[in-house]
Amino acid sequence: MTPDGNSAPRFEYAAIVRSLSPGLTLLARQLCDTPEDIVQEAFLKLFRQTPFPDQPRGWLFKVVRRDALNASRSQSRRKKHEQIRRDQRVNWFVDGVEESIDGEMATRALRSQPVAIREVLVLRLWNGLSFDEIGQLVGVSPRTASRRYQSGLQAIRSQLNIKLEDFTRG
């Protein structure tokens, strides 16, 4: 038994890593996109176990499989969420209109807005947040976030002399 209470001597750790890494990595690679990270974490978990498992090989394969499946599910959820956000994004500017908008003028128009309005515009237009999300983030009601957004758009349209139908879709 080692001083930290584990029953596996320290010299066995290196042998366990050398002998099991390739197989564990191969298993993890079949299940997720980050196999090396999963295997490394599994070894760290193993070496922290007290008492040390009687069957470290089986324990490691079980942990690697579980953690790789969890990582894969997590990545799938993240990709699905990102795709939904991309699909929800609206093409804010009508094709061809951007040539008639001077980038510097648009930047000045945005910067001329009060910070409270400017942050709502940026959160909504460039980050795709809902008014509920914006309200929670900046500490206002969703209705107030919506009013700030509409007010900001109207002010920028006025400054740039752009008609509503020329500036945005839907």
Image (cartoon, grey):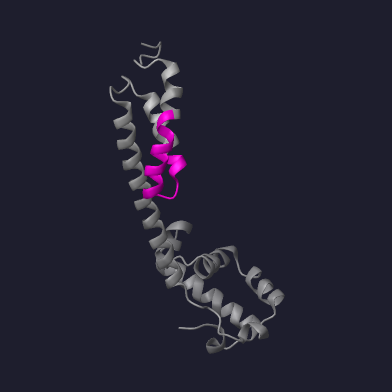
- Residue at point 32% right, 36% down? 61
Q: What residue do we see at 55% from left, 77% from top?
A: 153
As for residue 157 lying within the magenta part, the answer is no
The C terminus - image quarter: bottom left
Q: Does the magenta stretch include residue 22?
A: yes
Query: In screen coordinates, is 113 left or right of 22?
Result: right
Foreground of the two, 15 or 28:
15
Q: Residue at x 46, y 67 (%)?
A: 145
Which residues are drawn in magenta? 19-38
Question: Observer-nearest residue: 96 or 29?
Answer: 29
| Image location (x, y in percent) of residue 16 | 41, 26
Give coordinates of residue 167: x percent, y percent.
Answer: 56, 84
Foreground pick, 11 / 48: 11
| Quadrant that contains the N terminus | top left
Q: Please name the residue shown 53% across and 89% down the image.
A: 165
Give the percent coordinates (x, y) of residue 28.
Answer: 39, 44
